[in-house]
Image (cartoon, grey):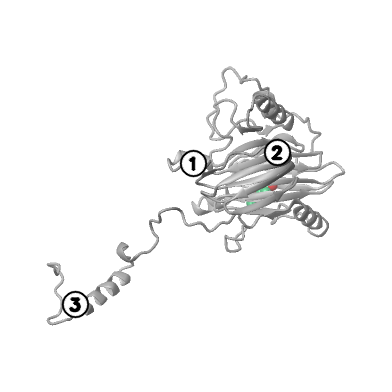
Amino acid sequence: MASPKFTAPDGMPKQDQVNEFYQAVAEADLQPLWVQKGIMPKEPPLAAVPFAWKWKTLKELAERSGELIPIDRGGDRRVLSLSNPGLSGQPFATPTLWGAVQYLGPGEVAPAHRHTPAALRFVIEGSGVWTLVNGDPVAMSPGDLVLTPSWSWHEHHNPGDVPMLWFDALDLPLARSLDAVFFENGPDQMVNRAVDPTSNSELHFGSGAGLVPFEEKVTQAYSPLFAYRWKDTDRALANTLRKSETGTASLRFVDPTRGIDVMPTMRCSMHRVSAGAKTRTSRRNGSSVWVTFRGSAVATIGEERFYLDEGDMFAVPSWCPISIEATHDADFFCTSDAPVFEALGLDRAEFLD
Ligand code: 1HN
């Protein structure tokens, strides 16, 4: 039936009226829902693929970048990003997470800047580096998790005589898809001070054993503790494993004052799998990036099997089943976008075995 306001020219065939209608809709920058395909798929259509990057390659290329590429203003960091082959050449490990290996040579400094995408480091190799987070010097050693939350000033210093290599993760792809990326350079004048390896953040919030400052209220969106030390993580994993019947232990890094994720966009966790043990097969929506910190294992992600050795990194896309079977006692660092899904009420997870 014709609408009261639009009368088709006398005798115009129906099909011509329909064609004219579609043309008018397009000219008005509108699109009818009924012709659109795939707008409400049964399950998320995935672009990112399960993928692993070998440490041998990451390390070799990071070292070569150290010899060939200076750290200058502009680039600011010597970083090789994990580029998921399913993401059309974008420098992202998953649709929401940036993952990378960063190399800082002896005597080098990565200059101060800040950005709204939140970042974290998980140290793989080296010693003697410290990073200045909002003026607080935080020492870095293998196995440590170090946070540089959204909009915090940060610069990295390597006054020692060995290079350091670490894993970087940022919520950059997420922030970018929200049009939320801002960036600012800091002063070129570097803070040059002898570093007490214990940051103020650790003195206040990192004593452990459930103790936090008596009256200090934390109101920011991220953890006031900027460093989670390997010796604490290792001890907590060992304690958990002692009472585990599965040969596996999984721990989450949290804000010590509130028990919530360390940052609002990235969950951080550490997983220990004893030689011969296997995790359950599970999946969740949202994606994650993993670092094999110690040992070796076979990970089954979706249909693919990945043979993992120390330093190998891998990406788990949304809704992809994953299980890990250790060939030697293995430890994994993992970061995911789970807090975002939970905050939005979009989280879904299940076990498949
Ligand atoms: C960044 O600031 C760092 O501060 C590392 O170490 C990786 C990737 C994209 C944008 C900024 C860092 C980064 C980054």
Q: Give the labeled residue for mark 2.
A: 276
The image's mark for residue 251 is none
What's the distance in space between the residues labelled 2 and 3, CA to CA? 70 Å
Q: SS at mark 1?
A: strand
- Note whether residue 190 is visible: no
Estimate the x, y position of residue 297 in percent, counting from the top left.
70, 44
Ligand 1 within 8 Å of disc 1? The answer is no
Estimate the x, y position of residue 103 in percent, counting from the top left.
76, 50
What's the distance in space between the residues labelled 1 and 3, CA to CA? 50 Å
User: N-terminal of the two: label 1 or label 3?
Assistant: 3
Ligand 1 within 8 Å of disc 2? The answer is no
Asked if 18 appears above or below 269 in the picture, the reply is below
- Mark 1: give few (<14), some (14-19) or many (20+) Cα within 10 Å: few
Q: Is residue 167 left or right of residue 219?
A: right
Which quarter shows the N terminus?
A: bottom left
Q: SS at mark 2?
A: loop
- Residue 327's quadrant in the figure? top right
User: N-terminal of the two: label 2 or label 3?
Assistant: 3
Give, as a three-letter code, the residue at label 3. Answer: Lys
Asked if 218 appears above or below 149 in the picture, the reply is above
The image's mark for residue 349 is 1
User: N-terminal of the two: label 1 or label 2?
Assistant: 2
- Mark 2: give few (<14), some (14-19) or many (20+) Cα within 10 Å: few
Give, as a three-letter code, the residue at label 1. Answer: Ala
Q: Give the labeled residue for mark 3.
A: 14
